[in-house]
Image (cartoon, rainbow, N blue to C red):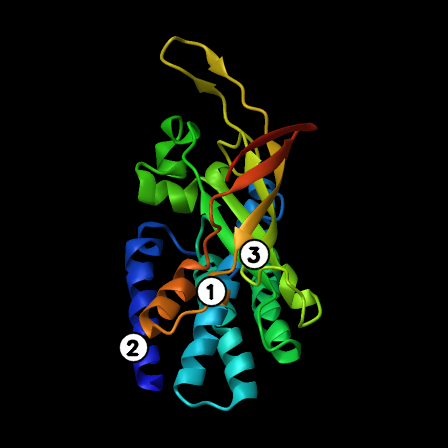
Amino acid sequence: MGSVAAVAYTGSVIGLSNAWYKQYKTEKFHFFNDNSEWLQMDKVGHAYTTYTLGLAGMQTLRWAGVKEKKAIWLGGFTGTFYLTTIEMFDAYSQNWGFSWGDMGANAAGSLLVCLQEQFWKEQRLQLKFSFYRTNYPQYRPDLLGNNFSEQVLKDYNGQIYWLSANVSSFLKKENKFPKWLNIAVGYGADGMTGGMQNIVIIDADGNTKDFLRQRQYYFSLDCDLTKIKTRSKFLKSVFRVINILKIPAPALELTGGKMKLLVK
């Protein structure tokens, strides 16, 4: 199992280096403060990524027969270990640098996995993700994505990160609250065509496009698919994978002091 993980890790790092960083110039190790970029959406994304990879790493080590405490802490920090490698690429890249903000977000995601598993033996609070397409990539496709798959990763305007709480887990064991029903709060942002600030954009008619950068907050219902009882090992695996995504449901959105009801 260790050799397979090592090969997968090495292969992905080499592939990332050739596909992304190779096209940019390098320089000596340096730091870069990007904490004000993208209204911190990228930082929440880091935490979500390490949380998700930590769950997978922990479950993999358990399957391999690793002792519980090691499986929790070594597996749970899989995401931070992996993203630290990427952070080192940034540190030597002329376009970026080593970000302590990224590292803090990475550690936060991993700790959310480990501490819950250590003290509750389950994930009562889960980080989840949802995405919807926006109109912003048409103005800066190289930065925000040329197609749907790129936009999911690059267009922070369409990303929403959720903290989904399993209510039943916090109640007494004999409670009748549906064990699969969660309550979720979400964070997103809108109006961003650049990291720190928006550039001047002129449309085909010669009109200047002025977008207002603003934070968005959400409240919605969600589903913890891992709480759905089934005897099928296949379905359990499918539910575990899909559970990293927020189930679409009616949601309240608060943007710029205005609230509206929609489905997210």
Q: 81 above or below 191?
A: below
| SS under mark 2 | helix
Q: Is residue 150 visible?
A: yes
Q: Nearer the viewer, residue 92 or 180?
A: 180
Does residue 222 sit above or below 56 in this rendering? Answer: above
Question: What amino acid does circle 1 point to?
Answer: Ile
Q: Where, by quadrant of the figure, is residue 182 drawn?
A: bottom right
The residue lying toward the viewer, choosing from 252 and 196, is 252
| Residue located 67% across and 72% down the image | 173
Specify the label residue 228 is tagged with.
1
What residue sits 43% from the left and 83% below the top? 61
Q: Are marks 3 and 2 in contact (CB under 8 Å)?
A: no
The quarter in which the N terminus is drawn is bottom left
Mark positioned earlier in the residue sequence (3 or 2):
2
What residue appears at the point 62 percent right and 32 percent down from the top-left corner? 214
Determine crowd level at label 2: few under 14, some 14-19, many 20+ residues with C-alpha closer than 10 A. few
**123 sits to left or right of 240:** right
- Dot 3 surroundings within 10 Å: few (below 14), some, or many (20 or more)? some
Q: From the viewer's side, name the closer residue of 162 and 142.
A: 162
Q: Amino acid at mark 2?
A: Val
Residue 7: which numbered mark, if any? 2
Residue 84 appears in the rendering: no
Instruction: Work out whether mark 3 precedes mark 1 in sequence or the reverse, and give the earlier one.
Output: 3
Residue at x-position 53% and y-position 60% = 180
The answer to whether 175 appears left or right of 144 in the picture is: right
Residue to which mark 3 is pinned = 181
Q: CA distance from mark 3 to mark 1?
A: 10 Å
Q: Position of residue 209 (x, y in %)?
A: 49, 17
